[in-house]
Image (tube, rainbow, N blue to C red):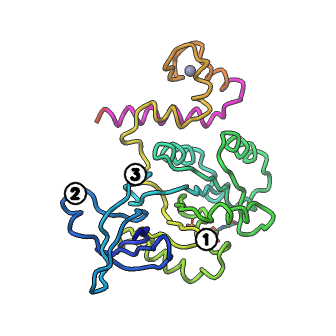
Amino acid sequence: MTARIISLLADLYKIQDLETKEVLSGKATGLFRYKKMSPKVGDIVEYDKLPDNQIYITKIHERRNDLVRPAISNIDQAIVVMSVLEPVFNDNLLDRFLTILEFNNIEPIILFSKWDLLTDDEEITKIFNYYQRLGYQCLKVSTKLNTLDNIKLNGLIEGKVSVLTGQSGVGKSSLLNYLYPNLTLKTNEISKALGRGKHTTRHVELLELGGGLIADTPGFGTMDFTGFEDIDIMHSFKEFFEYSKECKYNGCLHIKEPHCMVKSKLETGEILKTRYTNYLQFIEECKKLRKW
Ligand code: GDP
Ligand code: ZN
């Protein structure tokens, strides 16, 4: 029988049967101790029910993607929440999220949250449109204005396994409560369980919400580029990668090389300045990490 692991507490797994949707508790067989792998949240697994009704996970299906922190696998998409104000819009953090997600083969959805706080939305709309043109699904959301893309979010969550991410205070829990009002109590409990308190260890759990499964996480590990090569950074700045076909030099890093299409597109304003600054910074961070 096949199931998805939805939570793990101590050595007890909660799994959901893929067919019956029944939620069961079980353990992993000792077999996994001999392999260098243990089942984790998000895993699609085979399980057996023993005559004493104990449930045992016997096999892990191949993972489509696999994050270490949070420890979760097989994610369809990451919902990245970025507030436009309070805290002020952080382009560096957004590009960092996008780079890490592209590297891990996880599709990002960008939520520009607290849109209601803007008195003048011209500048942020330019940024919004830019990321949308890159091919990312972008939504303007607010828990105070119903006119925005709030409802679209429902449709995107349905049938998918998502991680909800973004720095603290951008409105992640408010959004969940807004979309799923009967969840209010639950999220508070969940926040506690998720280790928002100082001394609790972080705990990952997939919650059934809006016909999909969602895990709530503020970020991915240390949010650095350990294990990245320059090429990984280059690939995730999609528009740069596209333009690089017209750079004079093969493998142009768009730093000091002459006849660089990325730099000319930067000069004409077709590339956002912040994208270029973040790109340079990420390449530099990569270099430093390799030196260690
Ligand atoms: P989280 O840490 O990402 O879960 O953020 P919270 O949901 O706890 O929200 C942080 C603060 O922002 C709270 O005081 C919320 O009331 C406020 N907030 C959340 N969403 C919105 C919004 O759409 N508009 C405005 N103006 N404030 C919001
Ligand atoms: Zn170039």
Instruction: Pick whichever, 132 or 62, lies toward us.
Output: 62
Residue 105 rendering spot, x and y as whole percentages: 49, 46
The magenta stretch spans residue 53: no
In the image, the residue with mark 2 has its CB under 8 Å from the nearest atom of ligand 1: no
Instruction: Determine crowd level at label 3: few under 14, some 14-19, many 20+ residues with C-alpha closer than 10 A.
Output: few
Mark identifier at residue 222:
3
Quarter the N terminus occupies: bottom left
| Amino acid type, label 2 | Lys
Identified at 40% across, 33% down, the residue is 229
Quadrant for residue 201, please give it: bottom left
Residue behind mark 1:
211
Which residue occupies 36% across, 72% down?
8
**Is residue 68 toward the left or the right of residue 165 in the image?**
left
Q: Which mark is residue 35?
A: 2
Label 1 CB sits under 8 Å from any ligand 1 atom: no
Secondary element at image label 2: loop
The image shows residue 100 at horizontal and vertical percentages of 48, 46
| CA gap, disc 3 and disc 1 | 31 Å
Disc 1 to disc 2: CB gap under 8 Å:
no
Please give the range of residues in magenta. Answer: 267-290
**If the picture is divided into quarters, which one holds ligand 1?**
bottom right
Q: Secondary structure at mark 1?
A: loop
